[in-house]
Image (tube, rainbow, N blue to C red):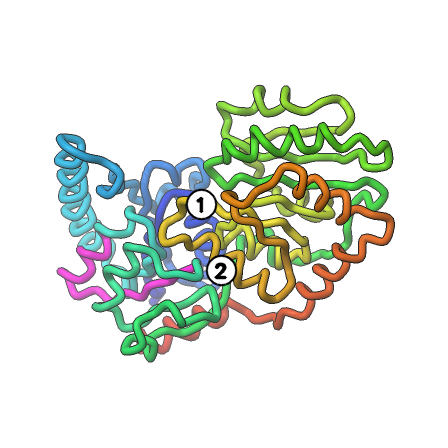
Amino acid sequence: MKKKILITTGGTGGHIFPMLGLHDYLISNNYEVFFVSDLRAKKYLNNQILSKTKILNVNSPFNVKGIFKVFTMGNLLYSIIVSFFFLIKNRPHLVIGSGGYASFPILIASILLNVKYVLYETNSIIGKTNKFFYFFCKKLLLGYDNKEFLSEKYRSKSFYVGQILRSSFLNKNYTKINNDQKTILIMGGSQGSEFFNKVIPKIFNEIKDINLSFKIYHQCRENDLNTTKDMYNSQHEVEVFNFKNNIEEIMKKSDLAITRSGSSSIAEMINLHLPFIAIPLPNSLDNHQFYNAKYYSDKNCCWLIRQQDFSFESFKKLIIDIFSSSKKELNNKIFSIKQIKEINPIKNFEKEILEYLE
């Protein structure tokens, strides 16, 4: 009989992408898999996955006040009831919670129905939802080999498995495409970055050296596509986009990424040996993006710049120095990335959940 696994996670790309990789692996290994997320996830899920997905109309209760908080809490209660009956109908052997407020209702229902569950934390610091359920769970699986932010009495039930990647990143090919063109990928995360859109084009416009003409791929929100494109002058070849299914192909073309510090994006760049400048989102929960980037900065795999410390002239100089004729710093970062010990996160993950189910 097929083992039934229910995956529940938040609806942003950072939450969804690793779980899509896990979903694909489990399906190919004869598991039956269900998904539970929020409305934001729909654009990332194909029809086959959506047919076994419950989309919850739930929002974070932490970002609203007054009467809106009452409605949000009402939606949350309703989502718990919906989750309760979804579990009864599908009877999974195990629920995997990967953070985000959309996973809260299904995990509450799992406790009420005595359904086994494990937590997976992709960030270097445990998020609010996982932190809430950590006390009750039997296993917390970690994307970062870092337990210092966990309460010491709970560390014994925490296990490092590594960062799960989308299936498209698993067939690695490190060969850089278009080696003669200096190529930069700018990523503000699945929700875009207003700071990146306004500041970074101006910096590249100020680089007047004819030998430093770039091919730039700039990811932003759909509403900002035209205004961001217009920010660049004609010196550089620029492609502005919102979302691409084949982002790994652009990463392979790129010499450098300028990025926020979501865990899945960083893991994908590390996987493809792409050096990056990390500018963490300054208001990320518990400053987790900073610590995500610091983990790799400490290993000399990236440059780390706090947004509050950002300097226009210093950043311009950094770009020029990186692409100097020797590319010494760029090559040093690539060398450091290659020194990171490779593991098999999905196999590690499966081992941990099978041990728990037994």
Q: Give the amino acid at mark 2.
A: Tyr
State the quadrant of the N terminus: bottom left
Q: Which residue does the image show at 64% across and 63% down from the upper left?
A: 300
Q: Which residue is mark 2?
A: 25
Of the two numbered discs 1 and 2 on the same chain, state the one appearing first in sequence: 2
Q: Which residue is mark 1?
A: 282
Magenta region, residue range:
106-122
Q: Are marks 1 and 2 in contact (CB under 8 Å)?
A: no
Q: Which residue does the image show at 46% across and 52% down from the upper left?
A: 289
Q: Which residue does the image show at 71% across and 46% down from the upper left?
A: 318
Q: Which residue does the image show at 72% across and 22% down from the upper left?
A: 233
In front: 110, or 284? Answer: 284
Q: Give the amino acid at mark 1.
A: Pro
In magenta segment, residue 116: yes
Circle 1 crowding by C-alpha within 10 Å: few under 14, some 14–19, many from 20? some
- Give residue 185's position: percent from left, percent from top: 65, 41
Per the model, the C-alpha gap separating discs 1 and 2 is 34 Å
In magenta segment, residue 179: no
| Horizontal arrangement in the rendering, residue 329 relative to residue 270 (left or right) | right
| Count of numbered tags | 2
In the figure, 313 relative to 155: above or below? above
- Give residue 48's position: percent from left, percent from top: 43, 43
- Give residue 31's position: percent from left, percent from top: 40, 62
In front: 55, or 220? Answer: 220
